[in-house]
Structures are given as C-alpha cells and as structure tokens.
Image: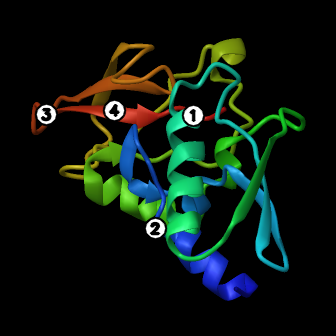
Amino acid sequence: MNDFQIRDLLEEVKDPEVPVLSILDLGVVRSFSVKGNAVDIVLTPTYSGCPAMQVIEDDIVSILNKNGVEEVNIEMVLAPAWTTDWITEKGKQQLKEFGIAPPEKSSVDKSSITGDAKFIGCPQCNSENTEMISQFGSTACKALYKCKDCLEPFDYFKCL
C-alpha cells in the first residue's frame, strides 16, 4: 500500500461523535507512514479524555486490516494539544451542512477575558442573532446555542 491508498482509507474513518467528519478533516491524524506491510499512525485526541479515541483506533485498525495491512501501530501524542485550528476548511463546511456551527476564526478566543460577546452564526439560517444556552452541548467539545430568528437549537464546535 502507498501513502495515497492509506490516506483514502483514513478518509473513510469517521469521528463517532461527529460522523460527518473524517479523522483527517477533524485533524486528529498527525502523521502516518507506510513501512512494507505495516502502517504507523500518530494521533492527537481532541482532548485527553475523549471517549471516541478508542473507537477511532479500532476503526483504523479494522479498515486497514480489511484492506491487507497486516500491522497497524498507533501512537497517541498529547503535545502539542489538538486545536480546532487543525480542522480542515472542508471539515468546517461539513460541520455547517450537518447543522453544527464550526469553530469561529482561530483557537485564540479571548472573549472570556474581555467580556465581549461571541457571535456564532446559526448553521440553519445563517443569522447571527443567537444566544448560548449552555457551555456544553451534545459533547464536551461543543456548546449549545439557540437561534433567535429561526428558533432552532444547534451545537457550536468550541474553539480549543
């Protein structure tokens, strides 16, 4: 197997908490290398206690084994810490189409220090007339918002 084939297979592995995103678009795959019939993969979890990482590891091993890779070595690296800056532009667009507001701008968010309100666009109607309902949404990495125009609740993938 070559790098392109491995990349295509990794593109099929989805984040179980956000199944619209591949692990490549999520940015948790730091690197991979092919050595004969073995593949070494370096992953960084979205946060150190992320319960989805074991499922992701199992899915990687499963798809690579099914496609003839005999040995899969996965290394979990915590530093530098994962950041939403690593989500690809394609991934951000997929989040929005899925109904989750993608992280705004970059991980440098000083709104909690400055007290400035953060305006998050509604992924349903694109309105910025939204309000945060809870710091935590369907998963710890998301906040729960509500659009004041279309009245739909939605998750916002927090900048980390």
Q: CA distance from mark 3 to mark 2?
A: 30 Å
Residue in the image at 67% along x and 87% along y: 4
Residue in the image at 69% along x and 16% along y: 114
Nearest to the eye among marks 3 and 1: give it. Answer: 1
Residue in the image at 56% along x and 61% along y: 25
Residue situated furthest left in the rendering: 150
The disc labelled 4 sits on which kind of residue?
Asp
Q: CA distance from mark 3 to mark 1?
A: 32 Å
Number of residues whose C-alpha sits closer than 10 Å to that of mark 2, classed few (under 14), some (14–19) or many (20 or more): some
**Marks 2 and 4, the one that precedes in the sequence:** 2
Label 2 element class: loop
Label 2, on which residue? Answer: 12
The C terminus: image quadrant: top right
Q: CA distance from mark 3 to mark 4?
A: 10 Å
**Marks 2 and 1, the one that precedes in the sequence:** 2
Q: Is residue 44 above or below residue 117?
A: below
Residue in the image at 61% along x and 55% along y: 87
Mark carried by residue 155: 4
Residue 50 point in image, percent of width and height? 58, 25
Please identify the quarter of the rendering in which residue 40 is found.
bottom right
Label 3, on which residue? Answer: 152
The disc labelled 1 sits on which kind of residue?
Gln
Please indicate, yes or no, whether residue 89 appears anywhere in the rendered image.
no
Residue 69 point in image, percent of width and height? 66, 71
Label 4 element class: strand
Label 1 element class: helix
**Marks 3 and 2, the one that precedes in the sequence:** 2
Residue nearest the observer in this picture, 87 or 147: 87
